[in-house]
């Protein structure tokens, strides 16, 4: 993939100029529109943006600790952080599921996975496995996951239908797919439109792929927590 500097996710009102200097977005020329909803598929954040994922103000802006609690993870569960980036959620979920559990940290960029591996080694974690996925395949074992989460990732999937069709078999029938997406319905959320999603878009795109939108939580300042289950769940 070609990596280049592009416009920031955040609007000028929140110092997007400074953010743009550190973000690298990947493969803009390959982006298109979702064939069902027609939304623009956003470019992928590159390794140059890893520092933004770890910014100190992220807790105040996005309340990830609230999101982690909302997942209600249990010790021993197997989860996947899809599009793990710098491993911000990976590390927190590894603690939540405990050493008897497991976290798959997936990304399509080896540079991001290198960052995750360094963090995992430094923290002496034994329950994290990194996975180099592809734009159309998460590369996860079948019937293995209690939960898969994408944090501001789904809207960047270059081949969303193919990717979801290959992700679904990795979820147990009782498993959950959780999307965190900036609320498109709220014009006050200071994120560029292509990095937002509406509830209606999620339903339109995911339900034809064998999922049911079961819960929408709006406990976070800017993002929906969208919980989907397999349509064949018991």
Image: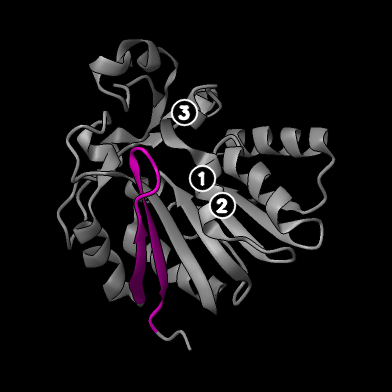
| Magenta segment | 211-231
Magenta segment includes 212:
yes
Determine the image quadrant of residue 116.
Answer: top right
Q: Earlier in the sequence, mark 2 or mark 3?
A: 3
Q: Quadrant of the N terminus?
A: top left
Determine the image quadrant of residue 164.
Answer: bottom left
Structural crowding at the residue carrying mark 2, measured as other residues with C-alpha within 10 Å and reported as few (<14), some (14–19) or many (≥20): few
What residue appears at the point 38 percent right and 29 percent down from the top-left corner?
A: 25
Q: Main secondary structure of the magenta part?
A: strand
Q: Judge whether 27 appears above or below 82 on screen.
A: above
Q: CA distance from mark 2 to mark 3?
A: 16 Å
Q: CA distance from mark 1 to mark 3?
A: 11 Å
Instruction: Determine contact: label 1, label 2, CB under 8 Å.
Output: yes
Residue 66: numbered disc: 1
Quick one: SS at disc 3?
helix
Quick one: SS at disc 2?
helix
Disc 3 designates what residue?
A: 60
Disc 2 designates what residue?
A: 69
């Amino acid at each position: 993939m070609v990596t280049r500097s592009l416009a920031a996710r955040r609007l000028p009102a929140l110092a997007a100029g400074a953010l743009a200097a550190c973000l690298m977005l990947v493969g803009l020329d390959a982006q298109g529109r979702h064939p069902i909803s027609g939304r623009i598929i956003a470019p992928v954040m590159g390794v140059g943006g890893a520092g933004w994922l770890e910014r100190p103000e992220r807790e105040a802006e996005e309340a990830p600790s609230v999101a982690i609690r909302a997942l209600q993870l249990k010790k021993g569960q197997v989860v996947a952080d899809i599009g793990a980036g710098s491993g911000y959620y990976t590390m927190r979920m590894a603690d939540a599921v405990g050493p008897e559990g497991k976290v798959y940290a997936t990304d399509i960029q080896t540079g991001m996975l290198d960052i995750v591996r360094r963090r995992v080694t430094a923290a002496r974690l034994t329950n994290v496995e990194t996975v180099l996925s592809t734009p159309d395949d998460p590369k996860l074992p079948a019937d293995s996951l209690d939960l898969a989460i994408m944090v501001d990732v789904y809207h960047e999937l270059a081949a969303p239908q193919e990717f979801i069709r290959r992700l679904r078999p990795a979820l147990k029938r009782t498993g959950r797919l959780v999307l965190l997406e900036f609320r498109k319905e709220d014009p006050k959320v200071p994120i560029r439109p292509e990095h937002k999603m509406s509830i209606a878009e999620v339903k339109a795109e995911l339900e034809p792929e064998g999922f049911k939108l079961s819960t929408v939580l709006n406990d976070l300042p800017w993002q929906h927590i969208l919980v989907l289950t397999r349509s064949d769940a018991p």
